[in-house]
Amino acid sequence: MGEKTYELAGKTARRVGFGSMQLHGVTGRESPPAEVAEAILRDAVAAGVDHLDTAQFYGGGEVNRLIHAALAPYPEGLLIASKVGAVETAGGTLATAQKPAQLREQVEQNLSALGVEALDLVYIRRVDRAPGLIAEGDQVVDLDDQLAEFTALRDEGKVRAIGLSHVSRAQVEAALPAGIAAVQNWYGLLNRKDEPVLELCAANGVAWVPFFPLGSAFSESPHFAGLRHVRDVPEVREIAAELDATPAQVGLAWLLAHTPKSLLIPGTADPEHLRENLAAADLEIPAAAMSRLDSLT
């Protein structure tokens, strides 16, 4: 499996972290009670997780509130990454918020909700391509303008590191001079369309943090309809049975073995799934099984 840690935003982080999105019902599922969500966050950190991924638009700020309630004052060494570029509307849906002033406002909201003076890492979530939201009208904003705002925020000490999300290889290449710490794109065993982006990141020391690493948790949404999950693939289930593992663990372990530059942020609202996800860091996939997985499309 190789190294168990990798550098992220100037810190050494374990390669399996925790994505907080599912702690609120943003995937169309019922939200866990607040006390359950807070307990999962504490359990994750107690188990060694030192990289949390969040966004102020998760649950209209509810997820950040849960993180603050569960973990503040934050343990030394804990890296909290957030995203900006969207907002939750009064109706509970997401809308694009791409203008530089909107991005700055979202950074300020994250700072306030999390109770910190600076954000370790913030991803600019672009909305240029499917799946997901697509920018229209005055929400079509040049990446250069967004990077200029974030460079100013970094100079002001409000953001320590800049990341990009849902971006193309050309966009990453153009952004490299600004000092990009990480890229968060949709990528996994069943979706490798962004392999060229991964290769560029690996060549330039940019951390790779894939979202939807196992498939889509949004299969009910029209934006993400038809996306598969690793548990639905017979070959993955067969390999999981051979290794006495779950399909999810196989999907995560494949990512860790595929590139040493990756850090994972699987999310869950289930304590047992949390333990399974973290255990994937220790799952060794034999070469023959890796070859079978590599051949999947």
Image (cartoon, helix red, strand yellow):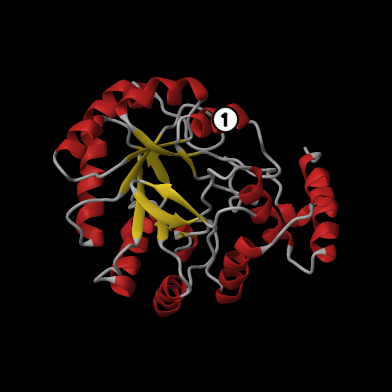
Q: Is residue 91 visible?
A: yes
Which quadrant does the C terminus fall into?
top right
**Residue 32 in picture, x, y percent from top left:** 48, 73
**Residue 20 in picture, x, y percent from top left:** 44, 60
Residue at x 29% of width, y 28% of height: 147
Nearest to the observer: residue 91 or residue 68: 68
Q: How many marks?
A: 1
Looking at the rendered structure, the secondary structure element under dot 1 is: helix
Locate residue 86: give its quadrant.
top left
Locate residue 42: give its quadrant.
bottom left
Residue at the disc numbered 1 = 199
- Around disc 1, counting alpha carbons within 10 Å, would you say few (fewer than 14), some (14 to 19), or many (20 or more)? some
Residue sitting farthest toward the left:
156
Nearest to the observer: residue 202 or residue 79: 202
Which quadrant does the N terminus fall into?
bottom right
Residue at x 21% of width, y 51% of height: 118
Q: Is 170 rendered above or below residue 52? A: above
Give left or right: position of 168 versus 89: right
Q: Is 93 rendered above or below residue 24? A: above
